[in-house]
Image (tube, helix red, strand yellow):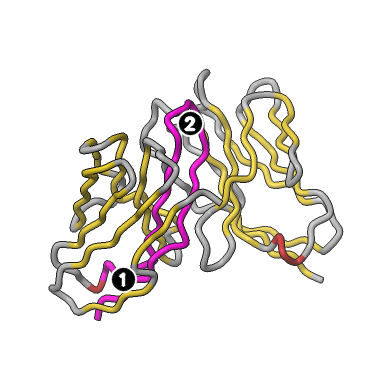
Amino acid sequence: DAGITQSPRHKVTETGTPVTLRCHQTENHRYMYWYRQDPGHGLRLIHYSYGVKDTDKGEVSDGYSVSRSKTEDFLLTLESATSSQTSVYFCAISESTVNSPLHFGNGTRLTVT
Amino acid sequence: LAKTTQPISMDSYEGQEVNITCSHNNIATNDYITWYQQFPSQGPRFIIQGYKTKVTNEVASLFIPADRKSSTLSLPRVSLSDTAVYYCLVGDRRDDKIIFGKGTRLHILP
């Protein structure tokens, strides 16, 4: 499996608190993605990065921000967590070559109470 | 990114061949077709990718007709462990946004 580590694996937090999820890769891949997955919605793209300091919005970016200060780390921040952000969050990476497939991490289960 | 349409769910039995078809009528010339598999509580896993005709690997085969407006993922002799959600994606790297549909929930029965 591709070297992708998501941390934490589980987190419970209270409404209104900031939360940061980390995705760390050891593959030196250019592209990194954050998805959330909820029952009935499938996988939805939050933000993605196409290089260091290069990021863009996905389908459901409201309430989320990201940062990528180095190739191996892509951080997802919920500035003020809400109950609607309770979800499973997946990070994915892919190489820079055309049509290279995505490789996913094991996910972070976030519960906002 | 080309829009795809797949069946929401399918049932099959162990030992059968399963074919899941994906429609992508507005596929572009440079688009590839990629399939992923997702087990419960895990991230999706790449299965197979193709551009035209037929592609086969140790897991599955992918059939793409000449007009490329659809594709069929074929899983030979399925087992209970093939129960998963299967996603069809169409696009190329120039579409940095990789958008997943809802996939096909495949349930294998004993």
Check whether the beta carbons of the residues at disc 1 and disc 2 lie within 8 A of each other: no
- The residue that appears at 47% across and 37% down in the rendered structure is B3
User: The residue marked by circle 2 belongs to what chain?
Assistant: B
Q: Circle 2 sits on which residue? A: B91
Q: Residue A84 at what x, y percent from top left?
A: 26, 69
Q: Is residue B82 above or below residue A86?
A: above
Q: Quadrant of residue B53?
A: top right
Element type at marker 2? strand
Q: Is residue A30 above or below residue B65?
A: below
Q: Residue furthest top?
A: B29
**Mark 1 surroundings within 10 Å by alpha-carbon count, few (fewer than 14), some (14 through 19), many (20 or more):** some
Whether A101 is among the magenta residues is yes
Whether A63 is among the magenta residues is no
Residue A86 image label? 1
Q: Residue B42 at what x, y percent from top left?
A: 52, 63
Residue B92 image label? none
**Mark 2 surroundings within 10 Å by alpha-carbon count, few (fewer than 14), some (14 through 19), many (20 or more):** many
Horizontal side, residue A113 vs residue B80: left or right: left
Residue span colored magenta? A84-113
Q: Is residue B49 above or below residue A90?
A: above
Horizontal side, residue B1 vs residue B62: left or right: left
Is disc 1 in the same subunit as disc 2? no
